[in-house]
Amino acid sequence: MRGFFSTGGTLPVLETERLILRQLLVRDRDDMYEYASNPAVTEYLMWQEHPSPEYTAKYLRYIQPRYRRGELFDWAIVLREQNKMIGTCGFCGFDTTHNCAEAGYVVSDRYWGQSYAAEALNAVIDFGFSELSLQRIFARHIVGNCRSGKVMEKCGMQYEGIMRGSMYIKNRYRDVAVYAILREDRNQTP
């Protein structure tokens, strides 16, 4: 899907009341490592916790060319007042045939329960409908991660069901809940 969505080599900055969503930078290493190395944060994610700050820096360097090629729509979630990166939110996959995308997010456990994930996800959903002209945006969470389901519902996503044993994550098959929102749910015009 190389370059399918052209952003001119830079990811647009999205702003909300409390957040700035911007491209991830190598200088975000310490903030990202702070949550990405925490087993409580990564428990329900597809990836393992980061083993070292160097690993996080290597990942952040790896994704920079993907931004330049217009292949990555993953924003750093930055607290506006503190200028602190507390997580990420973006699209982790596109289906161009059916004009839909999967959204995903992660927020440091120090900021759970403050609606930052929902605020970021709402901005990403709005961007997907208005700028990428998507028809459907969905998100998934491993069954048991009730917090994530609440974030999706807060953003107007509807629960669609459970895909039993559908993902092999961390050495076992996991049941995954699916939520989605359609363009017409946000009253967006094509």
Image (cartoon, grey):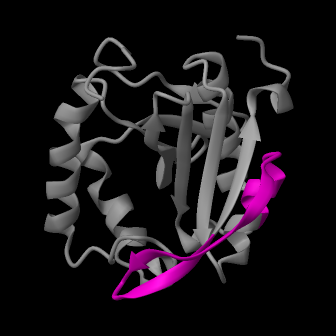
Q: Which residue is rendered at x = 23% and y = 46% of the image?
A: 26
Q: Quadrant of residue 59?
A: bottom left
Tell me the quadrant of the picture where the N terminus can be found. top left
Return the x and y of residue 149 as percentages of the image width and height: 73, 66
Q: In the rendered structure, does residue 70 fall within the stretch colored magenta?
A: no
Question: Could one spot residue 170 in this view of the protein?
Answer: yes
- Outermost residue on the bottom side: it is 172
Return the x and y of residue 60 as percentages of the image width and height: 23, 49
Return the x and y of residue 31 as percentages of the image width and height: 38, 60
Q: From the viewer's perspective, tell me whether residue 53 is left or right of residue 160.
A: left
Instruction: Reply above or below: 1 against 151.
Output: above
Q: Which one is nearer the viewer's eye here, 161 or 80?
A: 161
Instruction: State the predominant SS element of the stretch in magenta.
Output: strand
Q: Quadrant of residue 111?
A: bottom right
Q: In the rendered structure, does residue 172 fall within the stretch colored magenta?
A: yes
Q: Which residues are magenta?
A: 150-176
Q: Quadrant of residue 147?
A: bottom right
Q: Which one is nearer the viewer's eye here, 96 or 116?
A: 96
Return the x and y of residue 33 as percentages of the image width and height: 32, 67
Q: From the viewer's perspective, tell me whether residue 43 is left or right of residue 72.
A: right
Q: Which one is nearer the viewer's eye here, 109 or 170?
A: 170
